[in-house]
Amino acid sequence: MLRVFRRNVGPPLWPGGCGRTATSVILRQYGTGKEIASAYKPSQVERSCESGPIPQLPSAFNQKRDNAPPFNVLLPPPNVTGELHLGHALTGAIQDALVRQARLSGRRTTWIPGMDHAGIATQVVVEKRLLKERNLTRHDLGRERFLQEVMQWKVEKEDSIRRALKKLGCSMDWSREYFTMDAHQSVAVKEAFVQLFDRGLIYRDRSLINWSCTLESAISDVEVENVEISGPTEIAVPGYSRNVTFGRMVDIAYKVQGSTEEIVVSTTRPETFLGDVAVAVHPDDGRYSHLRNKVTFLWHPVRKEEIPLIFDNAVDRSFGTGAVKITPAHDRFDFELGRRHHLATVEVIDERGRVQEHFGPFTGMPRYEAREALLEYLAKLSLLRGIKPHTMLLPLCSRSKDVVELLLRPQWFVRCREMALRAMDAVREGKLEIVPNTFEREWFRWLDNCHDWCISRQLWWGHRIPAYCVRYDGAKERWIAARSEEEAREKFTALEPNAAKDAVSIEQDPDVLDTWFSSGLLPFSSTGWPGNVSPAHYPLQLMETGHDILFFWVARMVMLGQELTGKLPFERVLLHGIICDEFGRKMSKSLGNVIKPDHVIHGISLERLQAEAEDSHRQGVLSQAELGKSLAGQRKMFPSGIPECGIDALRFTLCSANVKNHFIHFNAQEAHTNKLFFNKIWQATRYTLACAERFDAGKTLDQTVDLRQTADRMPLMDRWILSRLGNTVQQCREAFASYNFHLATAALKTFFYSNFCDVYLETTKINMKPESTSVAALHCAVLKYCLTVGLRQMEPFTPYLAQELLTHLCAASSSIPVDLDHDAALGWVDPTVEESIECVLQICQHIRQAKNEYNPPIVRKHNPILHIYAKAPKLAAELHVLRDTIQQLTHCNGVVLHSDERLFGNVQYVVKGAPTHDCLIGIVAESGGGANGAGAEASRKMLAKLDAEIEKLLKTIGNEGYKRSASESVQKRHQEKLDRLQQQREEMLKMAS
């Protein structure tokens, strides 16, 4: 049971004399009966992640402020194609950190989860499974039964994805979860399409589009991977039993009609020669100036017809012969040039990748078989002028791995020009901020050259296009966008009132919409559009996603949001980088460097990693060659597997990278290091709880130490750690404001590691004694306050750890004050105190380094005495106050402070140094152990060891063969070592005397 006691506190004594009224909350948890474990074990701390609630801080830590602005964010929906990868984990970690931080600031948050139907990706994976498991195609099943199969896949996968997101600790509002093809989203998609169509922004046209012959569908630009080919390279193409050679430039001659001349053109796609309708040259190209002012035709040897020679300024005369073949049906440049010159189009390749009819012996051939046959044919006609190596970009479909063709097909398009201009203005005028701003240049470049967007796909899985083809009066037809067939009939009747109803047929377009169309509506469709949209939920305050989909998703959300709602869908865009391995390589199964979130969370052996790779090979994901490469890569990168690190360590590690970098290097070892860091905090909490039980037990609420009331008499080290805490809170706040999460995690590690655990906690041990009850109680209060506030700052990154330890702290015998005013910790910042302590800590560090670097262990192990002389009176006074602290931190047996430099100089020191310009330090080995003590015995053993090393080195140096063969540098190094050993021996003898 968690009880929250509130009390009004009058103007407290803030450091620096800042008086203000604060509201404090006292938390006490009774009857937990739960003891803290001896060490941090993520599997135990996170054991509730599978079935329990998402970790949250007690409600008193998340007090809402009425005047605080809302914070609304949308999760980029994972595809229902499989399991979550590290990229999803990165997005979840970043967004959850932002949402939790907003809650700590008193803001009301809405984080909307959802999943994407992922049209092409999901259809492909289900088709592969059907073929592998049941030897069936989607055509064997028919559209309705196939969609049932896909829906079953979706149900299976969305459940595992939902569990994985919850397991990561993502504190989303699951009551708002959507699926991009659920009933509401379907209504929104239809409404958007109809509105855009009625405004003239959606139209149907026969134009060039990316086409996958394997999928028999148009695909988007984001699904095209351009692979660089350097010279002749064999590539496996779906549907071909043998690899196809790419990376060749073919020169073909066209004969000029009525002349003995010929014009040679070059191409990497000779099969498209069948569809050439012209040859173009630059009007200023001197090689063809004699043909400039007359009509010139060339003879097409396959189609047996003339094609014109045309002149156009767009032709690059420096390329090859300066003459280019024009095939408008299969090339974007040629298509635009053909439009300017009113050229016809001749289509060569059909939807299945075969040569169309009317091409003689090539008709019906697969395109790449036709390529080789055509080259043989041209060679026989003596028109083949050469084949040479050529570097090129080969467009591959990311889903089917087929070579992408450009085909002319009737498709649906969105006019983008006006919407793109408004999107550019939004950034230019500062209404929309892109972080990092380096992507603004790309934003303007892409939108300024934005083509109309092809939104139709020849698939079965997806939102069916709400457009109806109405045929009437014989051959006439009209396309109408409508929310239903009934509405389509009504619209048609209004447009064609005289059309005979019995002569009208209506058929909905069988194609589906591009997935990015429905995803582009999500900022407003997920918050209620086209119904009532609450201003409290739309627009979003932030859109956080990967920079790789800035244009395919973010830009389209902006364009559609402005057009359909009249508002920008969000105020700011935060773009994170792409996850790579520690060497900067993109994660790939074929490289063996893929790390799954569960690999890091639960750990995995090398044997299991390799078994996963072999399983991918059996499933056809990896070829035999790729499997060998993958196994070798795994052995090199993970020779001992990946140790268990836990969810929080994964999240903390992901956020410890600069997420705004173009590429984010992930190293699983860093996650393990962070797990050890959490154990440090865990042990500090155990120490605090043990001290609280001893010195704070049984105290009533009124007897609880109030830090504010003791500020004026608080010891220097307590004030220092509270100042460091305040600075850390400020650093975290600034880091979140600038989305530099790595600076927040670095600040927290510095505070907990270097300040709290290594320094302050150690100094409290001096006073944790029965005779120091009042000081010990004060230390307990400071320890608990620092842990409470520090863990609140950790919570956005490590929700499980923070919840667990704060639960223990709340259950401690004394109460923990937690100020709802988030500026409270900042009030402890005291630069003067920090400067003083920093100087002392610098001296302590110098002493520790000197002890560790000095070889005889007697200095390190047998209680040396520390002598310090401070020139400046202020430093001398601080050293006097902190004498016990210095002794504790340096592990010395005593500290002697000298006020006279001459007295300091009269002492025989084992180690001497000057850590600062106004301070001298010296270390003397204490002889209190006596000749028969442990110290004397250690000295004798050390002397014996030194004598043995010296004797061995003298033999080596004195050897004649050594003098002849050893290099000068080696001999010098050995002599220096001998001198150093002999000096240490002399010092040991002095210490023992």
Image: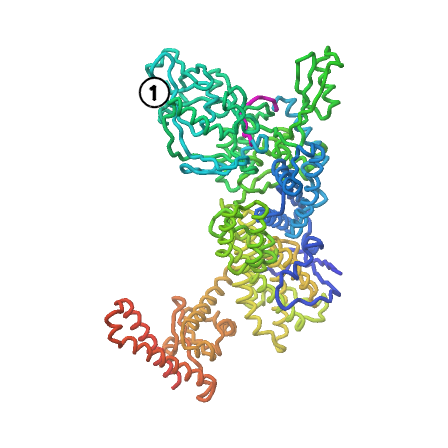
Q: How many marks?
A: 1
User: From the viewer's perspective, is 849 left or right of 120?
Assistant: left
Residue 667 spot, x, y in % from top left: 51, 54
Quarter of the C terminus within the rendering: bottom left
- Residue at 70% across, 14% down: 472
- Residue at the spot of label 1: 285
Residue 804 spot, x, y in % from top left: 66, 60
Residue 184 spot, x, y in % from top left: 72, 35
Classify 768 as above or below 790.
below
Nearer the observer, 350 or 973: 350
97 part of magenta stretch? no
SS assignment at label 1 = loop
Nearer the observer, 466 or 353: 353
Nearer the observer, 269 or 499: 269
User: From the viewer's perspective, is 927 left or right of 105?
Assistant: left
**Location of residue 238 (image quadrant):** top right
Say if residue 265 shows up in the picture.
no
Helix, strand or loop: magenta stretch? strand
- Residue at 37% across, 27% down: 319
- Residue at 63% across, 36% down: 119
Q: Which residues, given as a range, are shown in magenta?
A: 202-212
Classify 190 as above or below 919.
above
